[in-house]
Image: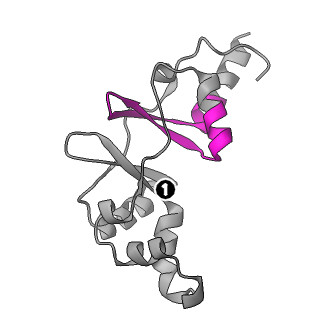
């Protein structure tokens, strides 16, 4: 991004209407979300709306395929997740987050550094949105067309 996009803040381009998983949701409900919405990851929140984790396709695939993996390849966390019955038991705790007051450069740098496609946007520990690579690409493209 050779141009300076530091004036574009996350709060202005993030997706605010986020499909979330509640900590107490059963694993079966999470499979239904993956089928219905086709996102790669889902934020996990508690009853107060605070972000507590994230569930991605890798976790769900690991759960499905656990019994097909040779026992010598089992990890402790995979074994625990394969027995999990709720989002809380299978989620990745402490996901990468960003503040809505950060700019487009900060979000892009974070995504590239951590090899992730979406970052949870958090304010006062509460999930307020999601910023994705697609959000960034579309915003930059839109601004280039205006120029």
Is residue 49 something one can see in this rendering? yes
Is residue 70 something one can see in this rendering? no
Residue 132, image quadrant: top right
Image position of 11 with respect to 62: above or below? above
Image position, residue 23 (x, y; %): 27, 55
Between residue 72 and residue 96, name the one nearer to us. Answer: 72
Secondary structure under the numbered disc 1 in the rendered image = loop
- The magenta-colored residue range is 109-137
Locate the N terminus and report the quarter of the image it occupies.
Answer: top right
Image position, residue 81 (x, y; %): 40, 72
Image position, residue 28 (x, y; %): 32, 70
**Residue occupying image coordinates x 38% and y 59%:** 33
The tally of labels here is 1
**Residue occupying image coordinates x 29% and y 72%:** 85
**Residue occupying image coordinates x 47% and y 78%:** 64
Residue 140, image quadrant: top right
Image position of 7 with respect to 78: above or below? above
The residue most toward the left is 47
**Residue occupying image coordinates x 27% and y 66%:** 26
Between residue 76 and residue 6, name the one nearer to us. Answer: 76
Magenta run includes residue 126: yes
Locate the C terminus and report the quarter of the image it occupies.
Answer: top right
Q: Residues within 10 Å of mark 1 (few under 14, many from 20)?
A: few
- Would you name the residue on which mark 1 appears? 38
Image position, residue 90 (x, y; %): 38, 65
Image position of 147 with respect to 112: above or below? above
Image position of 61 with respect to 87: above or below? below
Q: How is the image coloured?
A: one colour
- Left or right: 8 in relation to 125: right
């Amino acid at each position: 991004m050779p141009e300076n996009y530091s004036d574009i803040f996350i709060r202005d381009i993030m997706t605010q209407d986020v499909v979330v998983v509640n900590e107490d949701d059963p694993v079966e409900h999470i499979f239904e979300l993956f089928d219905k919405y086709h996102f790669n990851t889902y934020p996990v929140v508690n009853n107060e709306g605070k972000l507590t984790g994230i569930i991605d396709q890798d976790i769900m695939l690991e759960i499905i395929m656990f019994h097909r993996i040779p026992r010598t390849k089992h990890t402790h966390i995979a074994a625990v997740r394969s027995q999990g019955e709720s989002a809380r038991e299978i989620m990745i705790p402490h996901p990468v987050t960003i503040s809505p007051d950060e700019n487009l450069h900060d979000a892009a740098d974070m995504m590239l550094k951590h090899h992730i496609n979406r970052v949870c946007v958090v304010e006062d520990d509460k999930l307020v949105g999601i910023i994705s690579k697609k959000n960034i690409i579309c915003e930059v493209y839109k601004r280039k067309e205006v120029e």
